[in-house]
Image (cartoon, rainbow, N blue to C red):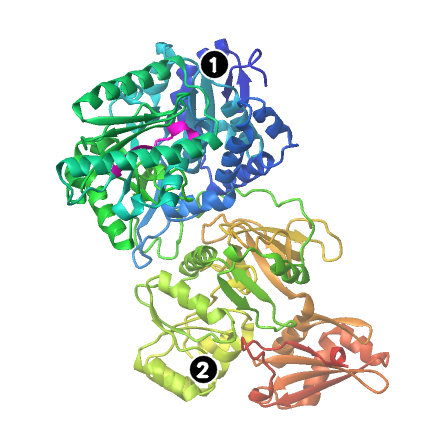
């Protein structure tokens, strides 16, 4: 883009002056049309991450274009600031702090016990009136508006470069959905063009104005009734030093650095240094003040000499001269003392009057006395202008002085030397920007109709998801290798897998990532039919050894505000039953194999006291015959998956009240799913089975992209009977469930199905594969309580599973059925999962 050919950006298109003028009157209609299409925060985060990466690459076309529009020597710093602000980590932290989560636009239950939904909604048409002295402010203000879902109109000065327009155009281009581009209009024109300014403000639902009192006053006058004016006006910041701190050269050097950085142009730059003069009166206090000012002038001269100062403009120099000359005159009255560089590059103006005044900036610092007991009373008259105070003292002094300054109107306390620094998600001028750019909305429907609806948005349309990344497939080995280089800042929680399909693998999460995943899984559990207001849940997942199931479901139930008995799985079934009965548990969470054993061992007692009404399981599946027994013989009313997930990826899917068998909705809040051909790296046709490949979008540390989880599945076409438009998949087992034995591929699930259909068998099934003397040997273990004739079972399995019959007939396989006691089945030590296939050939 060049300034001679295009002037304005309108929904991704560069238009000239005349075209922009014609479109101005359509802003209200534009907003009404665009706002009907929600903007998921995922879309904004992905686009910002793309642009942010370009801004860190000096060879990228965007970097080169933007750098050419900045003053020499500033490009690297300004573009670095923009890149840091646009990282996914920074924006996710901002969303969590300001709006409570990564998907604040979705209607969810603040208290899961109540069928009431709340969300953050855009305020509507948001106009940004940008300042002319901070290149990064304009585009970042629009990014904040996008995170809140607004239609954004940016007004920059006609004297500004094209930086903001080019950056916003790049942001729109990085979003293949087009949702960002249609929400951004950027116009360059002077504030003196009253007609255009009126056209913007008269149609705005909110106006974010950056500038002085005149700019804020103008926005107030032009805003229509009910329009929210968010003023980011000029502020005054200062430093406060106790006597001990004022005697330390290191403190003074750090303060001088704050003065010299950005020539005091930032709102957080120190304009005044207050010296604590508690207990000092009259002449003694004045001399102490002047002596300190002289010492600080020496330190400022040193630091300033290391940082050459740009010459102020004519108007700024006139103000500096006026203030300095007035202070020189007041020296004769004993009120002031002036210390200034001979070349005019800096000045320290000591003033015995404590009232807060603004300095003329450009390395101009006022030094004033202020006893600590008078801090609040002295500063409070300037309450509306106060922003940052750098306080130096011991911890008790900093704590007490901070409270006094907060009472006076200060919104931000920092150490000396870091006044211009900030942290991700920090409030600005005492408020959160995203909340100012949003509205809090609520929905209170009929309880019975929405009892199993976690998010009403899912009843409207399918979620808008970013496309899967262009990246190579990632396997478990690659994940484990990547852990060696993981940033320690992203390693808060460590989990190990259960090891049911191989050696246990390590997974690492940040606390924020874990919390986000547990919240998503909690919503899924609501959809599955768990009622936190009435169900009394016993958490019977396995615990210990860094295994995550018990801990995760403890967290999920905690976030649902549910009643929970955190028992964990234990071998003493009688003791577990005693606790369930004593505490009135009617809902069980656990592994199917463990719950099956418990309910059979203690079924009569549990049924006698009132019974178990609901069972939510994970890690394995109940067979159809097992479900029949639980329902008809033990009185269980609901048997549903608690979640489909893995240790490394976290929760991946959830069941609804209409889901049967292994069908789950995909947790699209967290992941993008691809289904690839079992043998080739290409997508399968809709409804065809394939390998499940997940991209985790909501992870700061282990960002698993195109992760091949080891499961097989297929997309379930058509709408779900529950009304949700969230995609569904049917799980078809794991790669390890298909084992090559006797040259044939034998599917474990085919054997389970044959046992159910031909033998009416409803116990556990385990396959053991061994190397024989002349042929391989396959042993199918069945529970002796439900299978009493091994030879009949062998005949039925061979007849039903043709691969077995062929292998036996060809002399390639010895097939045996073995009936064993329930405790003879092998389970993994950590998770308690049944080891479906035990391949002893791998151990030799």
Question: Circle 2 is placed at which residue position?
Answer: 599
Q: Start and end of the magenta stretch?
A: 262-274
Total numbered circles? 2
Question: Where residue 414 sits: x, y (%)?
Answer: 34, 44
In the image: residue 406, left or right of residue 158: left
**Closer to the camera in the image, 25 or 256:** 256
Precedes in sequence: disc 1 or disc 2:
1
Which one is in front in this view, the residue at disc 1 or the one at disc 2? Answer: 1
> What residue appears at the point 33 percent right and 49 percent down from the top-left corner?
117
Question: Where residue 643 sits: x, y (%)?
Answer: 49, 63
Pick the quarter of the image with the C terminus.
bottom right
In the image: residue 281, left or right of residue 708: left
Asked if residue 313 is positioned above or below residue 263 in the image, the reply reads: above
**Closer to the camera in the image, 548 or 609:** 548
Q: Secondary structure at mark 1?
A: helix
| Residue 120 magenta | no
Question: Where residue 568 sits: x, y (%)?
Answer: 43, 77
Q: Secondary structure at mark 2?
A: helix
For the residues marked 1 and 2, what is the alpha-carbon distance in whole angstroms? 72 Å
Question: Circle 1 is placed at which residue position?
Answer: 20
């Amino acid at each position: 883009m060049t300034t001679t050919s295009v002037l304005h950006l309108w929904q991704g298109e560069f238009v000239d002056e005349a075209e922009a003028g014609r479109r101005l009157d359509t802003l209200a209609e534009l907003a009404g049309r665009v706002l009907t299409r929600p903007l998921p925060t995922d879309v904004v985060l992905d686009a910002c991450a793309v642009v942010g990466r370009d801004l860190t690459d000096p060879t990228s076309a965007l970097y080169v274009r933007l750098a050419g529009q900045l003053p020499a020597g500033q490009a690297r710093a300004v573009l670095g600031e923009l890149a840091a602000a646009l990282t996914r980590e920074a924006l996710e932290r901002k969303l969590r702090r300001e709006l409570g989560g990564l998907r604040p636009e979705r209607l969810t239950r603040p208290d899961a016990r109540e069928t009431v939904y709340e969300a953050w909604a855009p305020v509507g048409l948001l106009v940004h009136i940008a300042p002319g002295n901070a290149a990064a402010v304009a585009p970042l203000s629009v990014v904040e508006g996008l995170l809140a879902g607004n239609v954004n109109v940016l007004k920059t000065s006609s004297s500004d470069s094209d930086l903001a327009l080019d950056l916003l155009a790049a942001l729109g281009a990085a979003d293949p959905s087009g949702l960002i581009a249609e929400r951004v209009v950027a116009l360059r024109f002077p504030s003196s063009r009253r007609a255009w300014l009126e056209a913007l403000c008269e149609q705005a639902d909110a106006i974010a104005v950056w500038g002085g009192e005149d700019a804020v006053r103008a926005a107030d006058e032009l805003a229509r009734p009910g329009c929210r004016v968010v003023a980011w006006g000029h502020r005054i910041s200062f430093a406060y030093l106790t006597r001990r701190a004022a005697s330390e050269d290191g403190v003074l050097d750090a303060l001088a650095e704050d003065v010299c950085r950005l020539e005091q142009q930032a709102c957080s730059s120190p304009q005044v240094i207050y010296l604590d003069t508690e207990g000092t009166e009259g002449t003694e206090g004045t001399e102490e003040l002047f002596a300190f000012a002289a010492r600080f002038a020496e330190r400022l001269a040193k630091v300033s000499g290391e940082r050459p100062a740009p010459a102020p403009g004519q108007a700024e120099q006139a103000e500096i001269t006026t203030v300095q000359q007035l202070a020189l005159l007041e020296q004769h009255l004993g009120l002031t003392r002036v210390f200034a560089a001979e070349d005019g590059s800096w000045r320290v103006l000591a003033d015995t009057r404590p009232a807060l005044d603004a300095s003329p900036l450009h390395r101009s610092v006022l030094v004033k006395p202020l006893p600590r007991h008078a801090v609040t009373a002295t500063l409070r008259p300037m309450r509306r202008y106060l922003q940052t105070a750098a306080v130096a003292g011991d911890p008790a002094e900093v704590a007490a002085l901070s409270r006094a300054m907060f009472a006076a109107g200060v919104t931000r306390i920092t150490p000396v030397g870091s006044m211009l620094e900030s942290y991700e998600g920090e409030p600005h001028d005492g408020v959160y920007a995203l909340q100012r750019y949003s509205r809090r909305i609520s929905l209170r429907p009929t309880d019975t109709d929405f009892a199993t609806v976690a998010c009403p948005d899912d009843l409207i349309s399918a979620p808008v998801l970013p496309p899967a990344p262009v990246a190579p497939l990632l396997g478990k080995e690659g994940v484990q290798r990547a852990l060696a280089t993981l940033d320690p800042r992203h390693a808060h929680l460590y989990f190990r897998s259960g090891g049911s399909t191989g050696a246990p693998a390590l997974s690492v999460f940040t606390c924020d990532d874990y919390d986000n995943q547990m919240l998503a899984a909690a919503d899924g559990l609501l959809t599955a039919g768990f009622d936190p207001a009435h169900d009394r849940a016993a958490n019977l997942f396995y615990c210990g050894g860094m295994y995550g199931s018990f801990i995760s479901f403890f967290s999920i139930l905690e976030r649902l505000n549910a009643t929970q008995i955190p028992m964990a799985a234990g071998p003493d079934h009688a003791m577990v039953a005693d606790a369930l009965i004593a505490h009135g548990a009617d809902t069980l969470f656990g592994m199917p194999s463990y719950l099956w054993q418990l309910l059979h061992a203690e079924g009569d007692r549990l049924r006698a006291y009132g019974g178990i009404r609901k069972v939510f399981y994970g890690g394995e599946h109940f067979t159809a015959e097992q479900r029949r027994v639980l329902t008809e013989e033990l009185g269980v009313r609901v048997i549903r998956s608690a979640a489909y997930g893995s240790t490394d990826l976290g929760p991946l899917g959830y069941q609804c009240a209409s889901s049967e068998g292994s069908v789950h909705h995909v947790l699209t809040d967290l992941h993008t799913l691809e289904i690839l051909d079992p043998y080739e790296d290409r997508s399968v046709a809709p409804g065809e089975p394939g390998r499940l490949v997940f991209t985790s979008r909501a992870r700061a540390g282990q960002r698993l992209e195109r992760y091949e989880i080891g499961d097989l599945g297929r997309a379930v076409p058509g709408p779900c009977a529950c009304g949700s438009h969230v995609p569904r998949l049917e799980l078809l087992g794991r790669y390890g469930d298909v084992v090559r034995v006797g040259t044939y591929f034998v599917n474990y699930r085919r054997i389970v199905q044959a046992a159910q259909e031909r033998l009416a068998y409803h116990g556990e099934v385990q396959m053991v594969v061994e190397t024989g003397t002349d042929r391989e040997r396959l042993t199918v273990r069945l529970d002796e309580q439900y299978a009493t004739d091994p030879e009949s079972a062998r005949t039925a399995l061979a007849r039903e599973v043709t691969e077995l019959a062929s292998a036996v007939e060809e002399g390639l396989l010895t097939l045996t059925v073995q009936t064993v006691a329930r405790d003879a089945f092998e389970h993994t030590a950590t998770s308690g999962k049944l080891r479906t296939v035990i391949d002893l050939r791998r151990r030799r």
